[in-house]
């Protein structure tokens, strides 16, 4: 036997020979959504099975009141796949409060957790904007570096401007270099004077000269 | 004599304001995951006006209220049916069907009990060319096909296009990549240049109406070995794509595969899957997760 027909549980085959071109919208979400309560879903975030935790994390995407609990969970969650889903739900629920909590994860020693937070923050331009100033002024140069990485991938109209501010005042060479690379992608002609000025600040770093040349060339479309 | 009251057509409904357009797009996005940018206003507006005329709605507000609150959901379904882009054809991105029969299936059956069926899912299937191409590839190009029970499921959010898929009648454009010998073996010519796929094939595929962005509907599928999810995610926004691939992840067996369209790459969406190269194509495999 090769091809066999089987209906997955609960899914009626379409029409079974009786096509219904404009039939009822059984393919669409119910108008009144019923399902487990927020309390049940929050409890399920601690369940033993990762499948249950993922499914709870996904279902909480329609419950903004669960945001802080989701942030708590993502910090202790060990399963990579559950973390991914938690981050997705936090992107769906995005708010300045969520962004501020995720910004805290940039200090984490756990690379996967940190990268998940960086990716999530890149997906919430409006929500992360208020946190970015503080991150760019953080005493820890690693945190400033991650903030620049976020800025580089952020679809936010002020991103190029902030990157210019970084290269004007940032003391750490690596953070500046990351900002220059980001400007090569998103910079506008207004950034060129600041890029040229940066040369003088790190005259002994040949890679900086090279990065600046590349960025200026890209921005000017050469 | 013509009844004068009847011959007077109501004036065409006025087009949408920007605010109404935005409101509609937000609603439609929430229901379907499909995102319309500002440059699609004409496309959306034309279809909305058509539905408003068909339903005798005098203004957008009345129509929108009906769509949202109609208990049967019928008008919402009609609206979805007119808004979707159903473009597809047989053996589109053919190298993925080659990868299926030469790479994925042989790997999936290694060490598997012959009693355990192979389950494939084409979502979205549009007018059916994709699931039928899967079936034809398996029957014609996989020498082990007869040793296994193979289920092919096919779903779409568009009920009208599903009815077409089930009817299985295709025109020349859609069939242009079908080899002549397949046409002769599996199709019946209808004389006008179109062909109907044979009943055995039509009846071997399980078609269903599924909205992939509704996790409850999607999760009625489980233990699927290979999902073809091609040329759908291009209509979604970033977070919608992430959610959708996470849904597919839940539905797949560990070790199962997702095939995306060539302009859709998983690397920008999620770290859940492992890219695998089969010949000229990259598909995405769900790893065997160890963590509880
Ligand atoms: C361009 S076709 C792709 C068909 C086929 N997979 C291919 O690649 O040729 C896109 C299909 O996605 C369907 N679609 C759009 N949103 C959907 C959703 N939320 N759930 C299921 N199908 C959806 C549309 O109805 C349409 O038939």
Image: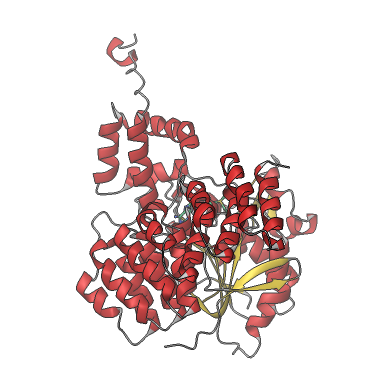
* Foreground of the two, B240 or A128: A128
Quadrant occupied by the N terminus of chain B: top left
Question: Which residue appears farthest toward the right when viewing the image?
Answer: B180
Q: Quadrant of the C terminus of chain B?
A: bottom left
Determine which quarter of the picture holds residue A204: bottom right
**Relative depth, front residue between B102 and B206:** B102
In the visual, does A107 lie left or right of B181? Answer: left
Tell me: B236 left or right of A126: right
In the rendered image, is residue A213 in sight? yes
Residue at screen point 36% across, 74% down: A55
From the top left corner, tell me how far across and down residue A28 is, in percent.
Answer: 36, 55
In the depicted view, which residue is nearer to us: B195 or B256?
A: B256
| Residue B260 located left or right of residue B162 | right
Residue B217 x, y percent position in the rendering: 38, 64
Q: Is residue B62 above or below residue B106?
A: above
Classify B115 as above or below B264: below
Residue B229, image x, y percentages: 56, 61
Residue A197 in the image: x percent, y percent? 61, 48
Q: Is A64 left, or right, of A222 in this rendering?
A: left
How many marks overall?
Answer: 0
Residue A8 in sight here: no
Q: Looking at the image, is A134 positioned above or below residue B88?
A: below
Q: How is the image coloured?
A: secondary structure
- Residue at 30%, 83% (x, y): give it: A46
């Amino acid at each position: 036997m090769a091809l066999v027909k089987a209906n997955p549980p609960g899914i009626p085959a379409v029409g079974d020979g009786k096509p219904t071109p404009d039939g009822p919208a059984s393919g669409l979400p119910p108008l009144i959504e019923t399902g487990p309560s927020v309390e049940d879903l929050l409890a399920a975030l601690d369940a033993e099975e990762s499948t249950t935790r993922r499914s709870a994390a996904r279902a909480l995407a329609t419950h903004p009141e669960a945001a802080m609990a989701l942030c708590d969970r993502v910090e202790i969650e060990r399963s990579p796949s559950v973390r991914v889903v938690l981050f997705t739900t936090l992107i769906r629920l995005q708010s300045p409060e969520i962004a501020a909590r995720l910004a805290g994860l940039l200090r984490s020693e756990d690379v996967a957790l940190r990268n998940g937070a960086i990716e999530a923050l890149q997906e919430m331009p409006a929500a992360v904007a208020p946190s970015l100033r503080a991150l760019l002024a953080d005493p820890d140069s690693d945190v400033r570096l991650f903030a620049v990485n976020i800025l580089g991938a952020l679809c936010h109209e002020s991103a190029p401007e902030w990157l210019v501010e970084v290269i004007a005042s940032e003391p750490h060479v690596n953070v500046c270099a990351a900002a220059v690379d980001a400007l090569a992608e998103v910079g506008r002609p207004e950034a060129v004077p600041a890029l040229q000025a940066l040369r003088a600040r790190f005259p002994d770093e040949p890679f900086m000269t090279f990065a600046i040349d590349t960025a200026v060339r890209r921005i000017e479309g050469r | 004599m013509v009844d004068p009251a009847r011959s007077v057509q109501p004036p065409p409904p006025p087009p949408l304001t920007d605010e109404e357009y935005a409101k509609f797009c937000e609603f439609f996005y929430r229901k379907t995951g499909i995102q319309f940018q500002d440059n699609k206003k004409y496309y959306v507006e034309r279809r909305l006006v058509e539905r408003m005329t068909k339903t005798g709605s005098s203004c957008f507000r009345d129509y929108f209220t009906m769509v949202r609150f109609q208990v049967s959901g019928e008008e919402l379904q009609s609206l979805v049916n007119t808004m979707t882009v159903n473009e597809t054809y047989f053996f589109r991105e053919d190298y993925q069907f080659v990868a299926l029969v030469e790479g994925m299936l042989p790997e999936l059956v290694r060490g598997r009990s012959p009693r355990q069926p192979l389950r494939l899912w084409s979502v979205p299937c549009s007018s059916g060319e994709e699931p039928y191409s899967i079936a034809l590839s398996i029957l014609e190009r996989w020498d082990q096909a007869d040793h296994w029970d193979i289920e092919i499921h096919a779903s779409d959010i568009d009920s009208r296009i599903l009815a077409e898929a089930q009817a299985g009648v295709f025109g020349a454009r859609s069939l242009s990549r079908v080899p002549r010998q397949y046409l002769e073996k599996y199709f019946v010519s209808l004389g006008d240049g179109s062909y109907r796929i044979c009943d055995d094939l039509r009846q071997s595929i399980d078609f269903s109406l599924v909205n992939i962005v509704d996790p409850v509907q999607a999760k009625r599928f489980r233990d699927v070995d290979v999902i073809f999810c091609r040329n759908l995610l291009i209509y979604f926004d970033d977070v919608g794509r992430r959610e959708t691939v996470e849904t597919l992840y839940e539905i797949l067996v560990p070790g199962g595969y997702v095939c995306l369209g060539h302009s859709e790459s998983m690397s920008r969406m999620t770290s859940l899957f492992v890219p695998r190269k089969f010949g000229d194509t990259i598909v995405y495999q769900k790893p065997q997760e160890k963590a509880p």
